[in-house]
Amino acid sequence: MKTTKTIFQDGSHKWVAIVRDPQKPHHLIDTNEYLVTHGGRGLLLDPGGAEIFPAVFSALATEFDPSALAGIFASHQDPDICSSLALWLEFNPQMHCYVSWLWSSFIPHFGGTVETFVQIPDPGLNIALEGLLLQAVPAHYLHSSGNFNLYDKTAKLLFSGDVGAALLPAGEEALFVEDFDRHIRHAEAFHRRWMGSNDAKRRWCERISQLEIDMLCPQHGAIYQGADVQRFINWFDELQVGIVGL
Amino acid sequence: MTHFLTMSEPPPQTGADLLRIVRINEEIKRVVGVSLKINIMALNAIFLAKRAGTAARGFAVLSNEFRNFSQDLRSSMAVLTGVVYGCVNEVSVMLQDLRFTRLLQEAGRQAPQAALAGILERREEKSAGHRENLAKLRGQLKRAFEEAFQMVELGGVLAKSAKIEAAYGQGFALPLAQVSGEFDQIVEEIRASLEALRRSAFFSGN
């Protein structure tokens, strides 16, 4: 089973990270899921692949009633992002899935009906969760061609999807980045290969620099907090991406 | 870089059913191919009988019947293909159901939830419905195979009659006998295919 860690709380407004499953088979990439709650309802960010559903579900259920989930935010279309969609919909078939318009006819292959999907236009969308306004921020081509991050202005948290992701070796699986220079080595190859456009990356860095962010929460690896957030943005801005070392 | 495909663990029952349906479909395609060959052979036999004249009038009638047989066989195979398609649909849904039920059960073991019990119950009802549909389709497929088999029996009778008629073909007796022999061979080929289909474990579940 995964573990949960509340990374922000102010009354009913919470961010819960669902992370690290020691029983996870090694052939499945490790993922972080995040639950945002407000006013008794929840939004699950990148709920993960079908095979890890039991681990995510059981961890989430320790913190929150799964039938109170109002929606799912899918940063993009990959199977490790939301191939568990049909299983979550079992708990609340009225649940919405927010996803880039680009993928709104692809993700239904994982489940859902036409009513399930809320298409996010390219410039982004405000998502209201019981009075809490969350912003879907464009991160196109990082890595997917239709890609969004989710920003919570009140909590000052950014769910950054694959941006900031790191493939951590055994023994270096802390939830927060502890030593940036040591950590970033595990992120470099991933970003060079997965991120396809230097131009898109530059625009993202400019856009994100304008936001007030206490924590940058990626879908893989560790969370950047405090000064490490800007450190990461600067590092990413300098990195040449879209490279295959053949 | 080359990736070599290998067979892994034997599939469970539903997965095995999908494999069996695929094999049934391949055999149906083979029968359709052979029946198209019969059509061409029958057409050639009609021309040959015409050249042989009145002595091969009976042979010409039988050759025409072979053309009808070929058409009927293809229609029968089209019906079978439709039923097979229905089976693929049901088995595919059942395979997905199995996977999702397994994952939900696993979630329930890790974090017992009242909502899960209701969900699993609903899924079981749906699964029972799919199992019932598949059983009906299995029965339909079996009946359709039996009908096709009877049709092939008729084809066998036609081939034997053509052999007898060929003997009355006077100067054309030899080529007519050769054609009727080919008819016989091809009907046997279809019979063998249908026999194999009849014995498919998809019907016995073994």
Image: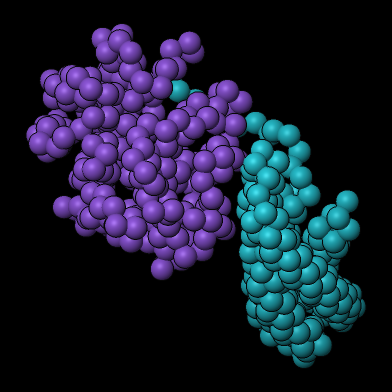
Chain colours: A purple, B cyan
Q: Is residue A24 above or below residue B79?
A: above
In the figure, B159 relative to A94: above or below?
below
Q: Quadrant of residue B154?
A: bottom right
Rendered position, B135 above or below A136: below
Residue B2 in the image, given as x and y percentages of width and height: 49, 25
Q: Nearer the viewer, residue A186 or B118?
A: B118
Q: Residue at x 56, y 40 (%)?
A: A62
Q: Does any portion of residue A76 appear in the rendered image?
A: yes
Residue A59 image position (x, y, % from top left): 55, 37
Give left or right: position of A45 versus B70: left
Examine the image and state in which quarter residue A243 appears. top left
Number of labels in the image equals 0
Which residue is nearer to you in this view: A229 or B83? A229
Q: Quadrant of residue A143?
A: top left
Q: Position of residue A1 (x, y in %)?
A: 59, 31
Q: B16 or B65: nearer the eye?
A: B16
Residue drawn 27% across and 13% down? A180
Whether residue A84 sits left or right of residue A135 in the image: it is right
Residue appearing at x 52%, y 41% in the figure: A63
Q: Nearer the viewer, residue B158 or A226?
A: A226
The answer to whether residue B106 is seen in the rendering is no
Where's residue A122, x and y in %?
A: 19, 53
A239 up-or-down from A44: above or below: above
